[in-house]
Image (cartoon, rainbow, N blue to C red):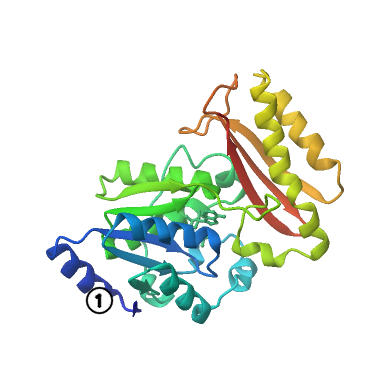
């Protein structure tokens, strides 16, 4: 596995790979790699000739400086994990090179970013879309793999790729979970042991929503109510949103149907957790 830090070296390599007709797969991450990231790398490995894993903690997608500074970082460990998972290139650009002084171009995906995460984290998706557009431009991936855990994010990226006619296919892979159902996330290590014990309730509530649908419930507010009740049975959860929405537009649905997605964000002891479930 080759580690690349400079933009020039990355551009040079992708140019060479393209010349050799190699298929490039990319997994963009913010590091602190875990089983969710590893699953994406494995999938890229199976699908392409050259797997590029990027680690870049993107300052412009954080709403709070404190959150950015506290974001877990362990490049040594990430290097080993990426290599073990089958990455060919470990791309770790520097913040100053991605956003040099005077940087002023941002990608703003309209509509789909108005609700849910977009509403609770102003400017977040502009930060995400901007950095992903830059990473795609540097790496030139044929396919890029994202996790369904950040469902709205992957929809935003897919829309950006469509709108800008970028030559990258964006795939969304299933959420990898702990045994008790908690969606794996780099932020989970911030949970206190007591908060961690409460977290299975999140996926339980989503599964409960799905089972209500399977039993015939079609009213979104009834399903939403059941989720809220289940979460609030235990003290500590602060619900930011629970939305039953169309899987592509992410607009709230009036009637729940096959394919409706339930999106959820909660805060637990100061840690923000998101999850979702597709109704089948
Ligand atoms: P992050 O490093 O958190 O920005 O995530 C990098 C990529 O990994 C994104 O596409 C995420 O959606 C994906 N990802 C994060 N957690 C998981 C998970 N538990 N299962 C699957 N993919 C994940």
Q: Quadrant of residue 43?
A: bottom left
The residue sitting at 25% across, 76% down in the picture is 8
Residue tagged by mark 1?
8
Horizontal arrangement in the rendering, residue 49 relative to residue 260 (left or right): left
| Residue ID at (56%, 51%) | 122
Placement of the N terminus among the 4 image quadrants: bottom left
Q: Position of residue 178 (x, y in %)?
A: 65, 56
Nearer to us in this view, 276 or 84: 84
- Spot occupied by residue 56 in the image (x, y as percentages of width and height): 45, 69
Residue found at the very far bottom of the displayed protein: 76
- Where residue 245 sits, quadrant-wise, is top right
Residue 166 in the image: above or below residue 39: above
Residue situated furthest left in the rendering: 19
Q: Residues within 10 Å of mark 1 (few under 14, many from 20)?
A: few
Q: How many marks?
A: 1
Q: Front-most of 222 and 84?
A: 84
Task: Please say if 11 is above or below 226.
Answer: below
Instruction: Determine whether, in the image, residue 168 is placed left or right of residue 21.
Output: right
Q: Is residue 89 visible?
A: yes
Residue 239, x across and y down, in percent:
74, 44
| Secondary structure type for disc 1 | helix
**In this view of the protein, can residue 220 be seen by the observer?**
no
The picture places residue 159, in percent across and down from the top left corner, at 38, 41
Residue drawn 73% across and 38% down? 205
């Amino acid at each position: 596995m080759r580690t690349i830090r400079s933009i020039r070296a990355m551009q040079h390599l992708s140019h060479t790979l393209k010349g050799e007709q190699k298929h490039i797969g990319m997994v963009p991450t913010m590091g602190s790699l875990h089983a969710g990231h590893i699953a994406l790398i494995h999938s890229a490995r199976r699908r392409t000739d050259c797997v590029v894993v990027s680690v870049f903690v993107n300052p412009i997608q954080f709403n709070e400086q404190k959150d950015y500074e506290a974001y877990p970082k362990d490049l040594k460990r990430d290097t080993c994990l990426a290599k073990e998972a089958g990455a060919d290139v470990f791309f770790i650009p520097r913040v100053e090179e991605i956003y040099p002084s005077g940087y002023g171009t941002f990608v703003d995906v309209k509509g789909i970013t108005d609700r849910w995460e977009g509403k609770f984290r102003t400017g977040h998706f502009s930060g995400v879309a901007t950095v992903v557009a830059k990473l795609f431009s540097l790496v030139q991936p044929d396919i890029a793999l994202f996790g369904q855990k950040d469902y709205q994010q992957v929809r935003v990226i897919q829309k950006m790729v469509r709108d800008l006619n970028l030559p990258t296919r964006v795939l969304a892979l299933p959420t990898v979970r702990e045994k008790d159902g908690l969606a794996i996330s780099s932020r989970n290590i911030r949970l206190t042991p007591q908060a961690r014990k409460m977290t299975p309730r999140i996926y339980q509530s989503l599964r409960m929503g799905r089972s209500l649908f399977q039993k015939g419930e079609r009213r979104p507010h009834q399903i939403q109510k059941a989720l809220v009740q289940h979460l609030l049975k235990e003290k500590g959860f602060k619900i930011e949103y629970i939305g039953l929405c169309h899987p592509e537009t992410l607009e709230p649905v009036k009637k729940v149907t096959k394919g409706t997605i339930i999106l959820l964000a909660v805060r637990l002891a100061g840690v923000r957790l998101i999850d979702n479930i597709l109704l089948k």
